Image (tube, helix red, strand yellow):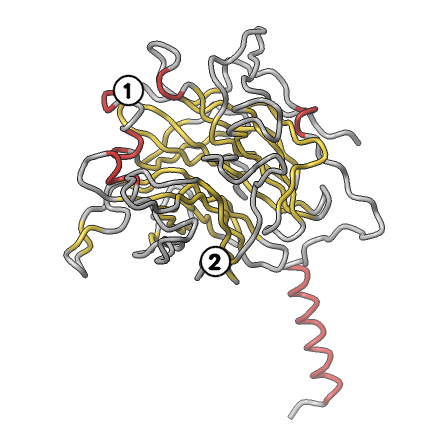
Amino acid sequence: MPPRKSLLGAVLCAALALSIAHPAPATPDPATPPAVLDLGARVRPLPAANRFALPGYHVWCGAPVAGPDGRYHLFYARWPVDKTFAPGWAIHSEIAYAVADHPEGPYSHVNVALPPRGINPATGQKYWDADVTHNANAFYHAGRYYLYYMGNYGDGTYWNHRNHQRVGLAVAENPAGPWKRLDHPVVDVTEDKNAFDSLCVTNPAACLRPDGGALLIYKAVEHVDGVVKGGRVRYGAAIADTPGGPYRKVPGDIFNSSKSDGTEWMLAEDPFIWFSHKYGRRYHAVARDAIGHFTGEKGGIALFESDDGLHWRPAARPKVLGARFIYADGTFGAKHLERPALLIQDDEPLLLFGAADGYNVVPGRPSSNVHIPLAPSAP
């Protein structure tokens, strides 16, 4: 048996080596006032080159991730132009992957990350995401990429596919795959037909919690007897002890408005969420302002904040973008931006990504993803 002093020294040396190899993440000094996030003041005109499009395809969504390899990865939805924008997105979409050497691009298509997968051999029935993957949202953590998405299956008709929407998760060590997809949704509908999320769940937005767990915000539609499209659209939350799950639903107050009487069909849409140590040591979200309650402009992009990820309020400066964005040549986008997402590196938002030109509002130009520059924060 080695002497006690030698054993203690060996343990201390091992601990020191481990701390050097895997340093603890830096935490801000609580005595230092957190910076104030004003994204709207940082938005800059869109250069024409900051656009990702694919010939012959509609491009939608857009989940950017700064990788540890020094490159920038983009997960997005695509489907053939000849299937039309709608109902094509609900019946033919697949999530694909592109990469760039610089944050603003250009991004180049690499492969299809989550293609249709048909029949589950274990059951002889279609997988829950057999036909469609859409609404990509992603982050990197501890050697793995976590890709959250909406999946569905159906009979080829819009409402059948739409009402089978569920939230899923795929995991990979390389952004180009291979991806491990779960056989079941991580968020499913609630069986109680009176619940706000009793018809379908979709549009996931996920981020790491400070404790190493994960927070997932999802869009939901309520069941209404005799109404195929259901009723109101609202948001719910689920949490997990690790990003891989399992996820459990928790109550919260998400993207509601003091101006609301509760009867509106939808208040906000397409959230992107993250936790920031630099900006308030709290959660933030950007989402589309569906009816103008938060920014004053229908279709604008609003900034929200939350101390716990479950109870949200408009930020002190909520307006990120108005109903239309501006190009570098001084002209305006033909329609509002949808599916907002931020490219964040070292706790700093670099660009605002978003889907543009949905429903073919620009003749001859399919939908695409644009990357709006954000000016650096003030020192």
Give the residue furthest to the left: 124
Circle nearer the N terminus (2, 1): 1
Residue 165: x percent and y percent?
33, 44
Residue 350 higher or lower than 207, as above or below:
above
Residue 204 seen in the current view: yes
Residue 226: x percent and y percent?
27, 42
Q: Amino acid at mark 2?
A: Lys
Q: Quote the CA–CA distance across marks 2 and 1.
A: 39 Å
Give the residue furthest to the bottom: 1
Q: Is residue 194 left or right of residue 208?
A: left
Image quadrant in which the C terminus is located: top right
Residue at position x 57%, y 49% from top?
Answer: 253
Element class at badge 2: strand
Residue at position x 32%, y 42% from top?
Answer: 114
Q: Is residue 35 left or right of residue 53?
A: right
Residue 356: x percent and y percent?
45, 21
Question: Which is closer to the viewer, label 2 or label 1?
Answer: 2
- How many numbered discs, if any? 2
| Residue 56 numbered mark, or none | 1
Residue in the foreground of this view, choosing between 250 and 102:
250
Residue 204 higher or lower than 378, as above or below:
below
Residue in the foreground of this view, choosing between 121 and 4:
121
Image quadrant in which the N terminus is located: bottom right
Residue 74: x percent and y percent?
45, 34
